[in-house]
Amino acid sequence: MTQAPLHPLDQALKLEPAGEHRYVGHTSQAYWNMIGPFGGATAAVMLQAALVHPERLGDPIALTVNFAGPIGEGDFEVEARPSRTNRSTQHWHLELRQNGEVTTTGSAVFAVRRQTWNSGEAVMPQVPAAESLPVMSGFAPVKWLGSYDIRAVRGAKPTTAPGTENPDSLSQFWIRDEPARTPDYASMAAWCDAFYPRIFLKRAGFVPAGTVSLTTYFHADAATLAAVGDSHVLGCAQARVFRQGFFDQSAEIWSASGELLATSHQIVYYKE
Amino acid sequence: MTQAPLHPLDQALKLEPAGEHRYVGHTSQAYWNMIGPFGGATAAVMLQAALVHPERLGDPIALTVNFAGPIGEGDFEVEARPSRTNRSTQHWHLELRQNGEVTTTGSAVFAVRRQTWNSGEAVMPQVPAAESLPVMSGFAPVKWLGSYDIRAVRGAKPTTAPGTENPDSLSQFWIRDEPARTPDYASMAAWCDAFYPRIFLKRAGFVPAGTVSLTTYFHADAATLAAVGDSHVLGCAQARVFRQGFFDQSAEIWSASGELLATSHQIVYYKE
């Protein structure tokens, strides 16, 4: 009997238990950015440590990841420690270390979802279907872009001449894993960081920039995620302000059927 | 010589050193909510522990606070531990404990701000001046509302009949501390949680609800904050989705002169 090879994301999410609340993982070439792992992959593997923890209660509601220092190629250790477990909610302390140094810190809140009165207030943008759009070709020499099938609606890449400025920093694109993979909380955590830095769009060119802190709220239960299957989801991201070396980004992830699966916010360092 | 009494917020922020990376504080009646402290005051005092820490580098950029369990009246301990200090950024682990139990966890990122190319993409809503609006009377029996001077532009309180629904959950109001106090990072952290739960507005009435996780990004340097002086700032808050017991909220805090001082996001538990 032969076994199907692991999806590259499942390979990147592989964690070996290494003592109480500790796991060892390994960086993935499929999710490599310029000088370290794609931040979304790091967020995903930190969430994964809580997802696979034997004391896990419920599903992720909130995830915060702080990018404190560089991660090099190779092994790393993730600590996922329940700070407090209540009847229906659970709080996690997350920390990623490499060679004894803290590179990434974070926290997560898990909860048991219940049936309640529901209401979607935000409205999904009207955009052409993913199937009607061409696959975006990578415009940056980073490997992780090849692990996604992205179909841009708007703000795909900086198009105006360098030195000029775009009136806004809004990107909208369809995205799925490449090869296709039914989403789960870890893959959605990664999608939420798949928008290239908003300042590239605003300034119409490359600017040294990196995410400092990323917070994602999950609005879908596991069944809703599973129902997405191989479909693309629509990601929308925009900045509100660029000031004194930092800009923000707020993002939404929509299912093709119009459900808001996640909202995500980050603050990003830039040098310009 | 007599000494002016401390402002109630400065009283609430008072921390006594209690060992390495540890401080003891005390809950404040001026910032009391229904059965515990106003979440904004808790966020502020956790940030304050990093602000007064002797190893502090730069100013706050990001703050995440996770509300894990109830805080009772009395003393509490705040741990503020630098997880990693780089040349111009610093990452903090924050934890509030009472009677040996973790009630609140969090993290903060501090940084040295630099002069860069800046751009405000979001635009301040056009609203009447604070001085032209009446002070909002408290509509909920909570003391902390008395510690703020709030002038509502829109969405002040649920106005439609109970059982009906509002088309949106947008609130806009001017706010300053009462008595007036020149803002700093701690008071701004508290303002960011001063919006009553969006579901009260959407559902036009009281619904059991509480913030689970709160993330604030600070976009102003200390001089910009100091220049606000006794003026009101404009707060705007809205939810995107209410689903399965949790809704989100995104908020903006604007100076009267049109600078975006902070953006803040939270996920809130509700029972309906």
Image: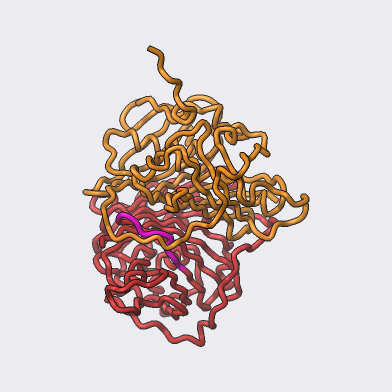
Chain colours: A orange, B red
Residue A100 visible (yes or no): no
Q: Is residue A136 left or right of residue B173?
A: right
Q: Position of residue A267 (x, y in %)?
A: 54, 52
Q: Where, by quadrant of the figure, is residue B254 drawn? A: bottom right
* Left or right: A49 in relation to A175: left
Q: Does the magenta stretch mainly form a helix, a strand or a loop?
A: strand
Taking the spot 59% from the left edge, 45% from the top edge, the residue there is A132
Which quarter of the figure is the N terminus of chain B placed in? Answer: bottom left
Residue A144: image location, x then y, percent:
57, 34
Dividing the picture into quadrants, the one containing residue A37 is top right
Q: Is residue B220 above or below residue B233?
A: above
Q: Inspect the magenta stretch and tell me whether residue B239 lies in it.
A: yes
* Residue A225 in view here: yes
Q: From this viewpoint, which residue is outermost toward the top?
A: A1
Count of residue discs: 0
**Residue B127 position by quadrant:** bottom right
Image quarter where the C terminus of chain B lies is bottom left
Q: Residue at x 36, y 83 (%)?
A: B137
Q: Please indicate whether residue B5 sits to the left or right of residue A83 in the image.
A: right
Q: Nearer the viewer, residue A254 or B171?
A: A254
Q: Residue at x 76, y 55 (%)?
A: A164
Nearer to us in this view, A193 or A7: A7
The span shown in magenta is: B237-244
Measuring 47% from the left and 48% from the top, which residue is drawn there?
A: A256
Front position in the image: B104 or A62: A62
Residue B141 lies in the magenta-colored region: no
Residue B121 x %, y %:
62, 62
Identity of the residue furthest to the front in this view: A132
Give the side of residue B64 with respect to residue B221, left or right. Answer: left
